[in-house]
Amino acid sequence: MEIRNLDRNNLLAEYGALTQRLLPWDAVNAPFEGSWAVIEPGTASTPHSHHEHEIFIATAGSAVIECDGERRAFTVGDVAFMPPGSVHTVINEGDVDFVFYSVWWDVEMTQRFAARHEMAS
């Protein structure tokens, strides 16, 4: 077993959030990438879009997700999916940090995963 710890004291600013990328990770041969993200109270991530599929898994606090102009409440235990090309942002209107885990993937990541898996067998 290996554990990769969240280092809250060394989060990086990315897309207007504080993040720590945990995947890719050599110990995990995964067809996706992922990171922790923290949206501080009264702030929002930068609206953006990309070619990957993406899910967010809410782990602490509450927020609002805006995706292509639609706003929805997002709280602990919820999972949100952003299709490729959608413009999305996470807005923390509360008074505590909103924490979520983001996972994204595309065809190229899947193909690289399959090739690594094939080489390992």
Image (cartoon, rainbow, N blue to C red):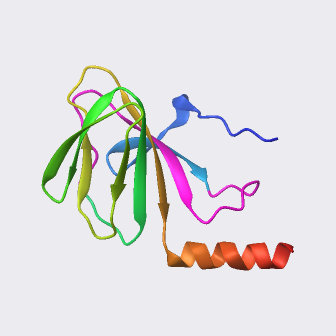
Tell me if residue 57 comes above or below residue 84 in the rendering. above
**Quadrant of the image for the N terminus?**
top right
Residue reaching furthest top? 95
Q: Nearer the viewer, residue 38 or 55?
A: 55
**Image quarter of residue 47:** bottom left
- The image quadrant that residue 3 belongs to is top right
Q: Residue at x 27, y 34 (%)?
A: 63
Tell me the magenta residue range: 24-47
Instruction: From the top left corner, tell me how far across and down residue 58 is, in percent.
Output: 41, 37
Q: Position of residue 74 (x, y in %)?
A: 29, 37
Residue 116, horizontal then vertical, whole percent:
75, 74
Could you tell me which residue is drawn at 82 percent across and 78 percent down? 119
Quadrant location of the C terminus in the rendered image: bottom right
The residue nearer to you, when weighing 46 against 10, is: 46
Q: Relative to residue 82, is residue 1 depicted above or below?
A: above
Residue 17 is situated, as x and y percent measured from the top left of the image, at: 36, 42
